[in-house]
Amino acid sequence: MANSIDPQTGLSFFDLSHPWGHGTPVWPGFPGVVLERGSFHAMQGTLTQRFSTVMHASTHVNAPLHLVAGAKSVGSVPLEHFFGNASVLAIPKGKWELVEPEDLENAKPKVQRGDTVIINTGWHHKYSDSQEYFAHAPGLSEAAAKWLVEKGAKLVCMDTAAIDHPLATSLAQHRNGPILRRLAAQYQKETGKDPQKEFPKWQPAHRLLLEAGIPTIEEVGGQLDLVSDQRITVAALPWRWKEGDASIVRLVGIKDQRGDYQIENGGRVGKGSDEKMKIHDLTHEWGHDIPFWPGKNPIHEFRRFQYHARDDAQVLHFTTVMHRGTHMDCPIHVLPNTADITDFDLWKFFGTGVAVSIPKARWEVITPDDLEQARPKIEPGDIVMINTGYHKKYGDNSSYHAYSPGLYKEAADWLVWRGVKMVGIDVQALDHPLGTYLADHGPGPFQPHLNDEYKAETGRDIIDDFPLWEPAHKTLLANGIPGIENIGGALDDVTGRRLTFMAFPWRWTGGDGSGVRVAAVEDPSQNFRI
């Protein structure tokens, strides 16, 4: 797998994630990933897949709440933890070995305060649904975790299934175990050591890090070897899940071969400045009670698989679709036999762009002239975030979903002509609602009363003015432009400005979309420009 290079900036992007989807290895005893089609191109004209999962599957962030009752959820950990400098340390380890403080001290490059620390033990090469990967792995010692806390690491990542040694987890004789009842005896037979004496505490390294407010990422993989023994920039933006114990993430490494792009001391700032980089969250909260599109996939269910009062840990299991909350669409969602969410190059999701104000009222259409006149001026290669003002109406209501403004074919054609690389908008869909199957398109009309209301207001049928089904979706996505729906959060704070934006979807092969965390990076020095 080759790294992805932005043709405009020369930045190289490295995917440090394992794939997620059907057959994803999961922690022994956890429910597996289940996928089913909610809609089919042959019948409904779209592909939407329902899925059930825990977030502890594939490459994922653990929030303090996972092991510390009452601590921060994954959606409330500041975004600054998930973007910035990283030291990628090659510390090869064999079966049941420990990463110790001296390993971290001797590794190159040196860990600096505020770093993300990524540890490459080599175990990602064994990633599979196997006892070798889960039960025979190395792990981080408690002393090494203390070293990382004292060094001021802001995020700790490993290429193993767990931060802790497997004999210090519930796989062996610890809380909620033994899941693998022969593991302790196997360890003692092979090593001659008593596992209960060697590993008397349950998940001590993981708990120590999370208690210190340091999130962790487990199951790092992908192109990890290509960036080891180096300092790079990393992004790993978890979902803004307000009650979440974890989040599957796309862990991305960024390097500039030309040497004119880097982040120093926690933020890319001008000389003589002590101001830090600021990250604005342009994402709506996600969770069990979020609003969702009034379509054909109503399932959105959550249950506690583990909870603190019983298990001293929280793991939530849920069933939903990707097209809820702030999320990204890809071509295969609306166009058969086309690209899935992993077929976009990583450089599409990161770069300089603009957040533009285009205020619109009920059922108004964003036009090419609106985009042409927007300021800052939309330039080729920009990421574009469109603020119509409708994110303030976001909720389980018709005003947001059925009566919003939106893009249509002409505006999408203009964005393609302009050569933008990603588009986000603060309404219910990339398309105007009357160009969706809420009206008389595809399997619709799902809300037939809308045509009567439109005719009463305009004297025309909806199909007269919106004859095409989701043309903005199809135009943008067919031209390789990722589209993000339902942006919100701090959108007003960045509107009218040129900043750096990013939103990385899950590495889901065959995926029709992905929930995303959309972030805008503000550099007080004005030097952080791609």
Image (spheres, rainbow, N blue to C red):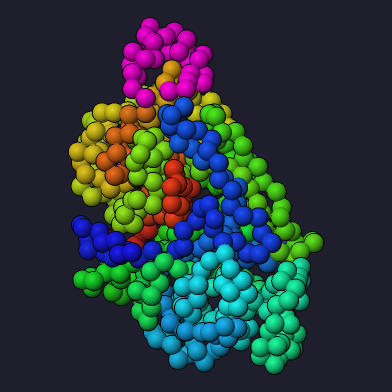
**As drawn, 200 above or below 2:** below
Quadrant of the snapshot with the N terminus? bottom left
Q: Tell me, yes or no, whether the highlighted magenta stretch contains residue 159.
A: no
Residue 389 shows in the view: no
User: Is residue 40 found left or right of 178 in the rendered image?
Assistant: left
**Residue 427 placement (x, y as % from top left):** 43, 35
User: Of 294 and 58, which appears nearest the observer?
Assistant: 58
**As drawn, 402 above or below 212:** above
Q: Splitting the image into 4 quarters, where does residue 181 fall?
A: bottom right
User: Is residue 278 found left or right of 354 in the rendered image?
Assistant: right
Q: Tell me, yes or no, whether the highlighted magenta stretch contains residue 445.
A: yes
**Residue 221 placement (x, y as % from top left):** 45, 68
User: Which residue lies at the image location 66% right of the left edge and 90% below the top edge?
Assistant: 191
User: Which residue lies at the image location 30% right of the left edge and 64% below the top edge?
Assistant: 2
Residues drawn in magenta: 442-469
User: Which residue lies at the image location 62% right of the left edge and 40% below the top edge?
Assistant: 300
**Residue 328 placement (x, y as % from top left):** 42, 44
